[in-house]
Amino acid sequence: MLSQLQQLLAQTALDITELQQQQLVKLVELLHKWNKAYNLTSVRDPQQMLSRHIMDSLVILPHLQGQRFIDVGTGPGLPGLPLAITAPDKEFVLLDSLGKRIRFIRQVCHELGLKNVTAVQSRVEDYQPDLKFDGVISRAFASLDDMLSWCEHLPNEQGKFYALKGVYPAAELEQLPSQFHVEDIIRLQVPDADGERHLVIITTRG
């Protein structure tokens, strides 16, 4: 699996250390193992997890600005765990309302020795952080409108929303509330993945 990951990484400009590559493979192994009992993802094949979960998460790494991020509706820690592994200098809060997902994330952090992850079980609208975030990340989360209204209290003054989407979300962009501004929409290249991927970066108008 390590060699397959290396082949996928070779198709990107990402600079991932050998230790981080080993941690990413271990993450897939743990996800595969836990998935049998806890049904954390519909992707059953570990090889597919590499492109559909790991690479799909990592491609947003070069676009993140700041030190402190929250991954809302993280599920089994995606994209938060791959990002935390490959950006050990950044802090990540991984938030989900389901206990089994949070237990899995805590187990991964324990086994991989990740010190830059805090797993929080909560509904996003109920979560009140002591410190606001430089970035609010969502993948496979609700519509942009829902994400912004539920997460509006999370970013700091310069904070940005990073929404991972499939096809270009034209209809959702037309319905954005006026207090938000689309800073950028980046078409992502995910090795071995089917379909389009876009990263929508949104800020609050000052």
Image (cartoon, rainbow, N blue to C red):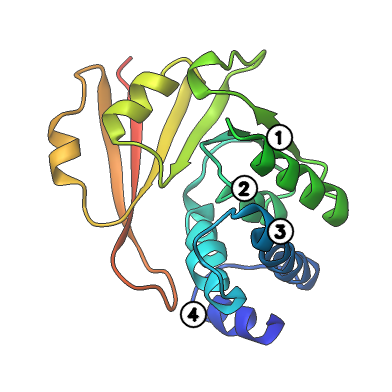
* Residues at marks 4 and 1, CA–CA distance in whole angstroms: 31 Å
The answer to which quarter of the image holds residue 186 is: bottom left
Residue under the image location 19 percent in, 37 percent down: 172
For badge 2, the amino acid type reads Gly
Task: Find residue 186 and name its label.
Answer: none
Q: How many residues crowd mark 3 within 10 Å: few (<14), some (14–19), many (20+)?
A: some
For badge 3, the amino acid type reads Trp
In front: mark 3 or mark 4? 3
* Residues at marks 3 and 4, CA–CA distance in whole angstroms: 29 Å
Q: Circle 1 sits in a helix, a strand or a loop, which is it?
A: strand
Q: Circle 2 sits in a helix, a strand or a loop, which is it?
A: loop
Q: Tell me the residue that label 1 is attached to.
A: 119
Q: Kindly indicate whether the residue at mark 3 contacts the one at mark 1 (C-beta within 8 angstroms).
A: no
* Residues at marks 3 and 2, CA–CA distance in whole angstroms: 13 Å
Task: Find residue 77 and name its label.
Answer: 2
Q: How many residues crowd mark 4 within 10 Å: few (<14), some (14–19), many (20+)?
A: few
* Residues at marks 2 and 1, CA–CA distance in whole angstroms: 9 Å
Q: Tell me the residue that label 3 is attached to.
A: 34
Q: Circle 3 sits in a helix, a strand or a loop, which is it?
A: helix
Res. 157 visible in picture: yes
User: Could you say which is closer to the camera, residue 169 or residue 184?
Assistant: 169
N-term mark: 3 or 2? 3
User: Could you say which is closer to the camera, residue 10 or residue 172?
Assistant: 172
User: Could you say which is closer to the camera, residue 184 or residue 131?
Assistant: 131
* Residues at marks 1 and 3, CA–CA distance in whole angstroms: 17 Å
For badge 1, the amino acid type reads Ala
N-term mark: 3 or 4? 4
Task: Find residue 11 and name its label.
Answer: 4
N-term mark: 2 or 4? 4
In the displayed structure, 35 sits above or below 76; it is below
N-term mark: 1 or 3? 3
